[in-house]
Image: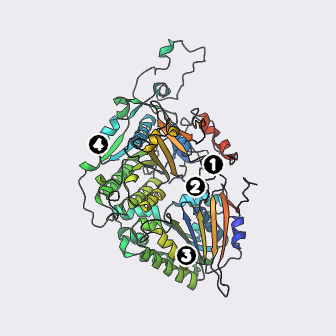
Amino acid sequence: MFPELNSILNSTPDSFKSSDFILVSDRRADASFLIHHHLSFYLRAGCKVCFLGLVQSFSHYSAVGQRLGVSLAQAREKGQLVFLEGLKNSIGVILQEDTSQETQPLSYLRTPGAGLEGLFRFVESSVRQSGDGDAGESWGPPVLLIDDLSVLLSLGVSVGAILDFTLYCKATVCSELQGNMVILVRCEEEDADDDEEGSNLLQRGLVHQCNLALHVEGLPTGYCRDIHGQMEVWWRQEGETICNRRKIFHFKVHDKGASFFARGTSSAVL
Amino acid sequence: MAAPVRGMIGSTSIGNTTSFQKKTRSKLVSIPGTRPSVQNGQLLVSSGVSSLDYVIGGGLAVGTLLLVEEDHYDSYSRMLLKYFLAEGVVCGHELFLASARDHPDDIMQELPSPIVDDVAGMKISEGQSQPSDPENPDTMKIAWRYQNQPKVQTALASSVRFGHYYDVSKTMEPELRQAAKCHSFYQLQETPVVTASSPLPSPYHSLLKSIQTVIRKEGFDGSTPQSKVRNVLRLGLHSLGSVLWGDDVCCKDNPAHCHALTTFLYILRGLLRTSLSVAMVTVPSHLTQNRAVMGRIIRLSDTAIALESFKGSEKETNPLYKDYHGLLHVRQLPRLNCLSCEVPDTKDLAFKLKRKQFTIEHCSFWPGYHSNLHSSKEKMYQRLPFKMSRCESQV
């Protein structure tokens, strides 16, 4: 959890907006540090978290989580965290042609054209389990975290199927269960030739659906060792206000967190 | 998993040549030819080129994938692959080589030979290594020209060093090469298997199956009992994405199998993360029409570099580049088990293949300014943490 980011977004683990769809995207940069922030944030807040880890192993998130002060292994044991190991389980699906029940969420690997229904059923069953009350521990509102959604494009799933999946998830998690969603999407260059099935199309579709968009890019002036990039925060306003709020910050990622500052106020410059 | 491997109890630290030891509660497995990373305790292996190890953050982390975008004539990328395999032979790692154009045995026969005075430091018995100490007055004086030769020319015992130097004008001795265990996969000799249910075309599917079989059989995924000594598997995959692999991503604008290579890399990533292996893949990226696909391929790998050679381009006669053979672009550096990644000093790097060294240097537009990134063999690596903390933002 990054304290500076909490003050920028005006949220703390004790009081945060519910039914929120947060989109984290990047273009030629790496925004995965924001996923680690949200993971530790919601675990600290006591929410039931469903994490689809499609590109890294559980030990990676666990090691970073330890530096940020949360123990993912403990959370998984207690039932607070449901983690889908995308990498490990996909080997079985493709190479052994495993068709058992456990690999149903990853059915898109076998038939990419068929869509993501299996994955949605997995998400639905994970977030609805909070009402069981069998162990006595009741968690807060459910949270769905996905890292990262654009890898599904590399595996052959169409943009339309992915947007359908996020709509279903939003309807279930945000509207019905008053929970939150945080999705990471990684994009290409803006002027890519084929915009038909690109990640740019996916990102535009998701920005249309989300409430809060965090976009990470490199600095427009070039590479710098001390400022790792810029982050654009965009809030969708409900109500009568016409204009949407948009702010740009520079950031630097450390070992145990990230610091955010207004443009031009990096400690290297001042 | 790419995390530091929880070690066997009582392992002696014969694999560590640096005196810096990161304080971790778990003992790292000591496999010859590996060392823990300074930044995050990852187990690193050398890529065979010491200056490349420096550029990518100390070495290749076990469990990760290095992507090399080939230069136009595939000369320097093939050289890097040979360095990678030669380093595996010298360190005693197991090798897996897959290629579609040249037979893997031909590639193995072209491996550069390690430079002799480095090899003399190798263990020549099963016991602890005894490096020759020329300053010790008690050692028997031998004529100076024979001082650096190994005393007994026996079968290869694993070298304890991290990173070696190679002489590209000579090929590796056959005895040295045959001492290493090498599995090969030659695409043109494989019988195509009809896999109707898999989204992967047959060559990639068979290659993945073959890799998985080797990992399981030799126990790199931890499935063998504790008594077997742990080792690292080095995978060298040459020219993936070219048409000889049955893939048309490099020859068509709208390929029929546009997701074949990316799906392959995704599954390979899964295999690497769950075993003690490291892979180097070369891709002829200059042939792909679609930049978006290259972007996805880079994001599916961990470390990605691109080689741009000057041969045949107008840069060959540019006086700025007269000392170099090409440019090296670092496309991506991995963030493994930590938030921050290795941030390089500069992104203007040029390489030159000399007979005994593949140098990578900062190539600046200022006349007369050349910094040798790799001045001395070991000292530089220990200097790394200090270099990173100093603020060098001023130009």
- Same chain for marks 4 and 3? no
Residue A149: x and y in percent read 49, 69
Residue A20: x and y in percent read 61, 78
Which residue is label 4 attached to? B103
Q: Earlier in the sequence, mark 4 or mark 2?
A: 4
**For the residue marked with disc 1, what is the amino acid?**
Arg
- The one nearer the camera, B154 or A56, is A56
Circles 3 and 1, Cβ within 8 Å, touching? The answer is: no
In front of the other: label 4 or label 2?
Answer: 4
Residue ID at (60%, 60%): A220
Q: Earlier in the sequence, mark 2 or mark 1?
A: 1
- Same chain for marks 3 and 1? no
Which residue is label 2 attached to? B337
Circles 2 and 1, Cβ within 8 Å, touching? The answer is: no
Q: Earlier in the sequence, mark 4 or mark 1?
A: 1
Residue ID at (56%, 15%): B139
Which chain does tag 4 point to? Answer: B
Give the secondary structure at mark 1.
loop
Residue A184: x and y in percent read 54, 68
Residue A207 got which mark?
3
**For the residue marked with disc 4, what is the amino acid?**
His
Give the secondary structure at mark 2.
loop
Residue sticking out furthest to the bottom = A240
Which chain does tag 2 point to? Answer: B
Which residue is label 1 attached to? B25
